[in-house]
Amino acid sequence: MSLLWTKDGTYRLASYQSESDLEAAINQVKAELFGEHRIYLDVKKKIGAKAGLRNIPDGYLVDLSGQKPRLYVVENELASHEPLRHIAVQILEFSLSFEAEPRAVKNILFNALQEQPDALTKCEAYAASHTFRNLDHFLDALVFETPFAALVVIDEIPENLENVLAKKFQFGVEVLELACYENGNGQRMFRFEPFLADLGDEETVTVPAETAVRKRIDASTIDTVVVPAREEGFQDVFLKENRWYAVRINGTKRNQIK
């Protein structure tokens, strides 16, 4: 069993009681989990054409970290619920419902933002600084002009989950693990890797005056993967076999890699 030790006591890996328990944890740590330039909307409304397939996503993530906004449809899941099969089915249905009635998604986002003044202000400020005429124009671009993408938040990532999702879908799917630890008094700690943390939020840029400044990276512009290599691996694997060892690439960034 995984264990966290602190001077105030130990915390043991614990299971969430339900998906609602997991969702409560997400809302508790959302600022650090998703980052300051992303907005998590915990809203559950049916999407899809009235006469066709309809379902209810667990939420939406609005990504304002780049020059173009990005929307993720969120599925919160427990590893105990046969995730490989269940998640794949859910995400497929989300994508079909989204494509069938995107205007309903836009209305859901608009109404959700009206109920969260801070989130609304962020979106309006982003729209004003990125050549959008207004919030309505911003939401049109977010829903109608950006490719569909999904985000899975799960308590434990099963083996091969990310590979299975990458093979099954042409669109990008990101996976986040949010593990829970508890001490003897029921106090909780959470372990996670922030969303897209391996891409880095900032880079150091040297301007002509040779002064180092911090500049936020636009993840939508990333097109290269750099991996460490030893001489024997480079000679025997890359040069002789024209291949390389498997490396982890974010689901929504695979199609960007040149």
Image (cartoon, grey):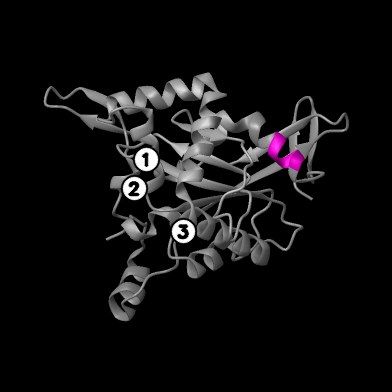
Q: Nearer the viewer, mark 1 or mark 3?
A: 1
Mark 2 lies on residue:
145
| Residue hosting label 3 | 248
First in sequence, mark 1 or 3: give its number.
Answer: 1
The residue pinned by badge 1 equals: 140
Where is residue 234, by image quadrant? bottom left
Identify the image quadrant of residue 127.
top left
Residue type, label 3: Arg
Residue 114 shown left or right of residue 20 in the figure? left
Q: Who's the residue at 49% across and 32% down the image? A: 110
Density class for disc 3 (Cα within 10 Å; few <14, some 14-19, many ≥20) is few
Asked whether 246 or 74 is in front, the reply is 74
Name the mark on residue 14.
none
Dominant SS type (magenta) = helix
Q: Position of residue 8 (x, y in %)?
A: 79, 24
**Residues at marks 1 and 2, CA–CA distance in whole angstroms:** 7 Å
Q: Seen in the image, is 184 located left or right of residue 150?
A: right
Labels 1 and 2 touching (C-beta < 8 A): yes
* Relative to 110, residue 175 above or below: below
**Contact (CB < 8 A) between labels 1 and 3?**
no
Q: Is residue 40 above or below residue 236?
A: above
Q: Which residues are magenta?
A: 20-24
Query: Residue at the location (51% across, 58% down)?
Result: 95
- For the residue labelled by badge 2, is the local secondary structure a helix, a strand or a loop? helix
| Residue 23 on the magenta span | yes
Mark 1 or mark 2: name the one nearer the start of the chain.
1
Q: How dense is the environment of label 1, judged by Cα within 10 Å: few (below 14), some, or many (20 and up)? A: some
Which SS class for mark 3? loop
